[in-house]
């Protein structure tokens, strides 16, 4: 059993491919096949990248051709050129091994960034050698997952012995998602920059969340029928003291002494206390549709859409709605309808909103279950709130049935459809906006 578990663990690590090289076909997906041949090629190419620089990948094939030609044409003067190239490669390889760096790397990656924005990664390098200087160092000069691109790598020419230096790299977050950044790797290209030696201390991988961009809303018309519930107070983050002044009355045994109104007591000739009542908050349901039909063809029965502009626009609008509602006196219950129903609650606090952004960054398209497949328990919970805002990725019979079920349960629903505004089969009581308007920041009122 132990041998089998160890074998499965090693095989899984092998099929994952090298951490520093992103290969889309080796990415873990449900019910997907990962080829051992592709994994072997990825490992070979990954280590080739680790020990040969970009310039070396051009020089080595040319050097190999020159040496091969000099072996065929014995009387050709190219033998001298081949010998010179061989000596240069040998000296560079010896210098790389001799002056290989020993570095301690501390990398700081932001927890979350906005899609379409630049961000920095900061490094602290410590040369652990007592007598050798580390030369020509560059950090994390490898391909990352699609959705993030490098603008400027962190580089330095010299790191003296027993010295710490600070560096930074600039990246661009192209697309919303959850990204795992491999452990930091420092490469030394000294002396000639053909070969390089990689230094990768033990370091856990970092997680980066890219949340959808959004334009804050200035005005939002909510459906009538919101219920004010006392239970919302205990679940929401409090702003100051969550009590409203109700009035004054005479003192009774058990009253809080700090609530005594001393000026009023002096005027009345008896002890008067201020009376408070608990604050009531508005709760509203926010239903997010993530159903994106899979593509069908004669080759693939069902192929997932990895990127949907309509879904990205819907999540951007969801972030704007949550931002608007949490800035007011609302507790928002978010229901993301995907392969399963995700229920989250946001109160009146910045950390709650950050948590919702993290959730929106990780949501994947749902290619299997239409949004209409809401259980009776979920409908009962939504009906208890009294009102809801539904963000739909289009309009069809399934979505129409869901809205009718909600309204039949006594829920006042405001429907926002992401689609073409020129569509004529949309009911007049629904709001329709295009993905381009949302992504360009033109939607400020709903």
Image (cartoon, rainbow, N blue to C red):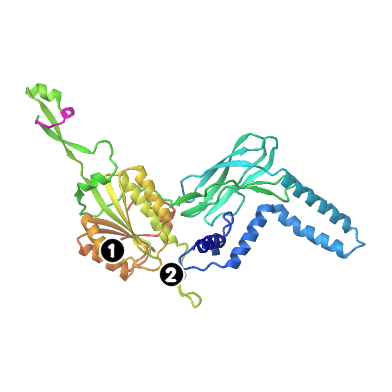
Q: Secondary structure at mark 2?
A: loop
Residue drawn where x is 14% and y is 23% of the image: 263
Left or right, residue 335 beside residue 54: left
Query: Which residue sits at x=12%, y=32%?
Result: 254
Q: Residues within 10 Å of mark 2 (few under 14, many from 20)?
A: some
Alpha carbon distance from label 2 to label 1: 29 Å
Q: How many marks?
A: 2
Q: Which stretch appears magenta?
A: 252-259
227 vs 75, nearest the viewer? 75
Residue appearing at x 65%, y 60% in the figure:
44
Does 256 appear in magenta? Answer: yes
Residue 218 visible in the displayed image: no
Question: Left of 235 or right of it: where is 198?
Answer: right
Vertical side of 130 occupied by 283: above or below? below
**Near-viewer residue (169 or 89):** 89
Q: Earlier in the sequence, mark 2 or mark 1?
A: 2
**Residue 379: in sight, yes or no?**
yes
Q: Which residue is mark 1?
A: 428
Q: Position of residue 85 (x, y in %)?
A: 82, 53
Q: Magenta region's main secondary structure?
A: loop
In this view, the residue in front, 5 or 66, is 5
- Dividing the picture into quarters, in which one does residue 416 lie? bottom left
Instruction: Check residue 294 in the rendering and tell me which mark sits there, or answer none.
Output: 2
- Outermost left residue: 269
Q: Position of residue 174 (x, y in %)?
A: 51, 53
Question: Marks 2 and 1: CB-CB under 8 Å?
Answer: no
Locate residue 222, reporting x and y percent: 26, 53
Q: Is residue 226 above or below residue 327?
A: below
Q: Residue 390's quadrant in the figure?
A: bottom left
Give percent across and percent down for residue 224: 21, 54
Mark 1, Cα crowd under 10 Å, few <14 / some 14-19 / many 20+, is few
Q: Is residue 53 magenta?
A: no
């Amino acid at each position: 059993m132990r041998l089998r578990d160890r074998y499965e663990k090693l095989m899984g690590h092998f099929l994952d491919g090298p951490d520093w090289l992103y290969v889309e076909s080796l990415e873990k997906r449900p019910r997907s096949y990962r080829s051992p041949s592709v994994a072997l090629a990825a490992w070979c190419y990954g280590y080739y990248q680790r020990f040969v620089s970009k310039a070396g990948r051009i020089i080595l094939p040319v050097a190999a051709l020159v040496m091969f030609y000099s072996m065929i044409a014995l009387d050709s003067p190219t033998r001298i050129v081949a010998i010179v190239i061989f000596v240069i490669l040998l000296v560079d390889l010896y210098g790389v091994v001799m002056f290989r760096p020993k570095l301690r790397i501390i990398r700081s990656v932001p927890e979350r960034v906005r899609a379409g924005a630049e961000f920095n990664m900061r490094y602290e390098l410590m040369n652990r050698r007592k007598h050798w200087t580390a030369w020509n160092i560059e950090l994390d000069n490898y391909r990352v997952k699609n959705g993030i691109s490098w603008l400027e790598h962190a580089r330095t020419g010299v790191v003296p012995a027993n010295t710490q230096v600070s560096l930074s790299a600039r990246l661009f977050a192209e697309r919303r998602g959850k990204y795992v950044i491999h452990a930091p790797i420092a490469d030394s290209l000294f002396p000639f920059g053909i070969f390089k030696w990689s230094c990768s201390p033990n370091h856990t991988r970092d997680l980066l969340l890219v949340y959808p961009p959004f334009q804050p809303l200035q005005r939002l018309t909510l459906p009538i029928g919101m219920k004010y519930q006392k239970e919302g107070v205990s679940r929401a983050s409090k702003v100051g003291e969550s009590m409203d002044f109700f009035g004054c009355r005479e003192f009774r045994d058990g009253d809080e002494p700090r609530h005594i109104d001393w000026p009023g007591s002096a005027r009345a000739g008896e002890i008067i206390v201020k009376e408070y009542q608990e604050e009531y908050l508005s709760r509203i349901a926010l239903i997010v549709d993530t159903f994106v039909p899979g593509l069908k063809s004669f080759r693939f029965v069902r192929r997932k859409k990895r990127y949907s502009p309509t879904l990205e626009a819907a999540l951007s609008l969801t972030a704007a709605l949550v931002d608007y509602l949490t800035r007011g006196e609302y507790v928002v219950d978010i229901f993301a309808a995907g392969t399963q129903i995700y229920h989250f609650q946001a109160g009146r606090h910045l950390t709650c909103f950050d948590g919702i952004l993290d959730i929106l960054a990780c949501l994947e398209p749902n290619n299997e279950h239409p949004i209409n497949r809401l259980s009776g328990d979920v409908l009962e919970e939504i009906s208890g709130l009294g009102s809801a805002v539904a963000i739909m990725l289009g309009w069809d019979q399934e979505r129409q049935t869901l809205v009718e079920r909600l309204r039949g349960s006594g829920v006042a629903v405001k429907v926002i459809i992401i689609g073409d505004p020129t569509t004529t089969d949309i009911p007049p009581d629904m709001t329709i906006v295009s993905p381009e308007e949302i992504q360009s920041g033109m939607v400020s009122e709903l």
